[in-house]
Amino acid sequence: MPNKFERTLVILKPDAIHRGITGEILDRFEQKGIKPVGMKMVKLSDLILDKHYAQHRGKHFFEPTKKYMKMLPVVLVVLEGLDIVKVVRTMCGPTDGRNAPPGTIRGDYSAGISRNIIHSSEDGEAADREIKLYFKSTEIFGYDKLDADFYYDVERGE
Ligand code: ATP
Ligand code: MG
């Protein structure tokens, strides 16, 4: 069965905004042939962060992480591609920047687990939930690239 085009959510966190590297990070995805289909800047609230990080409620890093995520606005991006959830998680690297290999976004830009530059959805279910949490359907745009067949074998989904 051919692979399917999927969507995932990334959040360029306040440290990425402050350091002025949002363009560089987006460029990595675009260089890889990954398509942005939704993008906006927002200031996150406790209300939305409680939903976003519900699985971490009660953990020692829950409140500090919420505080960090409210330091500045963030940039929310919906990305589309084959196996995109896994591909983007791999490009971001492990949670702790000090353990993340060079070449990954966290490996190249993050000096610690509490300031790790980027969020990406952990699986397809989380991606669907998170995209719905932050985007209205009218804020996401499907479009074709004329040269799509030079990024993927579109017909075979490979
Ligand atoms: P994200 O969900 O942001 O993509 P992740 O899936 O790699 O990151 P999670 O386990 O979901 O990691 O943790 C969510 C966020 O909480 C992390 O990105 C980080 O900002 C923070 N965090 C996680 N573990 C710790 C920790 N031990 N100490 C401090 N902060 C942490
Ligand atoms: Mg996570």
Image (tube, rainbow, N blue to C red):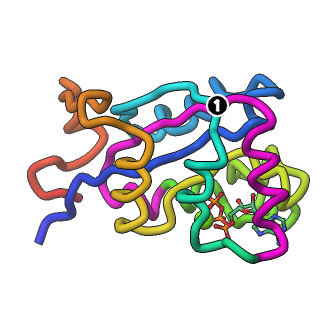
Q: Is residue 124 magenta?
A: no
For mark 1, give the secondary structure.
loop
Circle 1 Cα neighbour tier, 10 Å, few/some/many (<14 / 14–19 / ≥20): few
Quadrant assignment, res 65: bottom right
Q: Which residue is mark 1?
A: 43
In the image, residue 117 above or below residue 18: below
The three-letter code of the residue at mark 1 reads Lys
Quadrant assignment, res 150: top left
Looking at the figure, which quarter contains the C terminus?
bottom left
| Residue 4 horizontal/vertical position (percent) | 20, 59
| Residue 96 horizontal/vertical position (percent) | 80, 64
In the image, residue 149 above or below residue 9: above
Q: Provide the residue span drawn in magenta.
A: 59-87
Looking at the figure, which quarter contains the N terminus?
bottom left
Quadrant in which ligand 1 is drawn: bottom right
Residue at 68% across, 29% down: 73
92 or 16, which lies in front?
16
| Residue 37 horizontal/vertical position (percent) | 34, 32
Q: Is residue 78 magenta?
A: yes
